Image (cartoon, grey):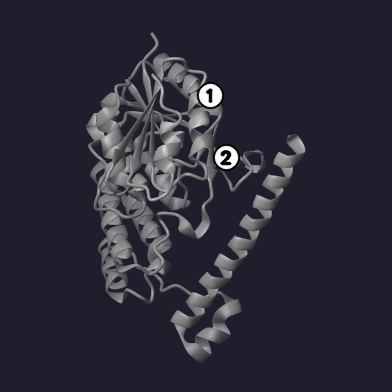
Amino acid sequence: MKPLVSILIPAYNAERFLAETIRSAQRQSWPHKEIIIVDDGSKDNTLALAKSFASAEVKVISQPNQGAAAARNHLASLAQGEYLQWLDADDLMSPDKVARQVAAALECGSRRTLLSSGWAYFIYRPHTAKFVPTLLWENLSPCEWLLRKWEHNLHMQTATWLVSRELTQAAGPWNTQLLGDDDGEYFSRVITASNGIRFVPGEKVYYRNSGFTRLSYMNRSDRKMEAQVYGMQLQIGYLRAMTDDARARAACITYLQTWLPGFYPNRLDLVAQMKRQAEALGGHLELPQISWKYRWIQQTLGWSAAQRTQVNYNEWKDSLLRAWDKALYHLERRRDV
């Protein structure tokens, strides 16, 4: 059996890295594949670049800008494969990633088994990615996977998964109301619909760290914060529908506590909502504390000023790190020419 695998790439203003991502998909050793790119109304040269790769194997479609979730739903509707491989427009995969996961899927014999793999961050140079196993890099039941995710603040990157069409249909579409962490909510549904997660060791996903431009970065946006809380409520509901024991409730409280600093003090209404939910779960949330380095700012100018200073410092540090890595990337390219 050689099931068709659909490699699905949503793209928006992705001209800088899209070519590398498409080549990563083309280099997959699994021979029976299709690659579909949906350009979500990009304002740069993303569409033209994608079309330069068009072939019998690579299909390119454009749509008016509707957001990442809508682009992914469009991709899913176009896919013909028995398995779906999601791949963001700036990420990469090791060449045998799909092939080894398909082999594992065929070996276990169930279309309800979800396949995962290892992943690591990089900025410009994939060879610098450090693959550090976590408690999710194991064969796990759906419930145990979600519990560990929240108990230890872990996650798996979108491209690590290989999802059967049966599981895709059972999970339903991507939620277009979510403006961040839409992948977390979507794969929570995929996981709960599965009969278990099988981790395939050795294969790798390279997750490009785009810093503070990431979709999940809320940056005090009211719409993003409200959508984030909505998505969190959905995910808590999925776990509690499977199990509502003491461990599950504690994991939900930990999940709420982890995200609480993103809403304080700008949206005290959402903070109050999260605190009420924690109390209903039998626990409570602690208000976040500012780092000791910024407490003097908090004492003189207030919490918001201290928080903003901390964010600005982290953005500045991230920019320096990215600039340095970019410079090394160009030096390595010149050396290799």
Mark 2, mark 1: which one is toward the viewer? 1
Disc 2 residue type? Pro
For label 1, the crowd category at 10 Å Cα-Cα, with few meaning under 14, some 14 to 19 and many 20 or more, is some
User: On the rendered structure, is 280 left or right of 145?
Assistant: left
Quadrant, the C terminus: top right
Instruction: Where is residue 162? Give x, y as percent.
Output: 40, 29
Q: Nearer the viewer, residue 37 or 231?
A: 37
Instruction: Where is residue 317? Give x, y as percent.
Output: 62, 65
Residue 145 lies, with reference to residue 209, above or below; the image says above
Disc 1 residue type? Arg
Residue 12 lies, with reference to residue 211, above or below; the image says above
Element type where label 2 sits in the image: loop
Residue 170 lies, with reference to residue 315, above or below; the image says above
Label disc, if present, on residue 90 of the rendered structure: none
Instruction: Where is residue 73? Give x, y as percent.
Output: 26, 38
- Measured Cα–Cα span from mark 2 to mark 1: 25 Å
Q: Nearer the viewer, residue 264 or 39?
A: 39
User: On the rendered structure, is 204 left or right of 304?
Assistant: right
Residue named by callout 2: 133
Q: Residue furthest bottom?
A: 300
Label disc, if present, on residue 27 of the rendered structure: 1
Element type where label 1 sits in the image: loop
Give the residue displayed 52% in from the left and 18% down from the top: 29
Q: Quadrant of residue 146?
A: top left
User: Residue 305: in sight, yes or no?
Assistant: yes
Give the residue displayed 31% in from the left and 76% down from the top: 268
User: On the rendered structure, is 29 left or right of 132?
Assistant: left
Q: Nearer the viewer, residue 35 or 55?
A: 55
User: Residue 137: in sight, yes or no?
Assistant: no
Q: Residue furthest right?
A: 335
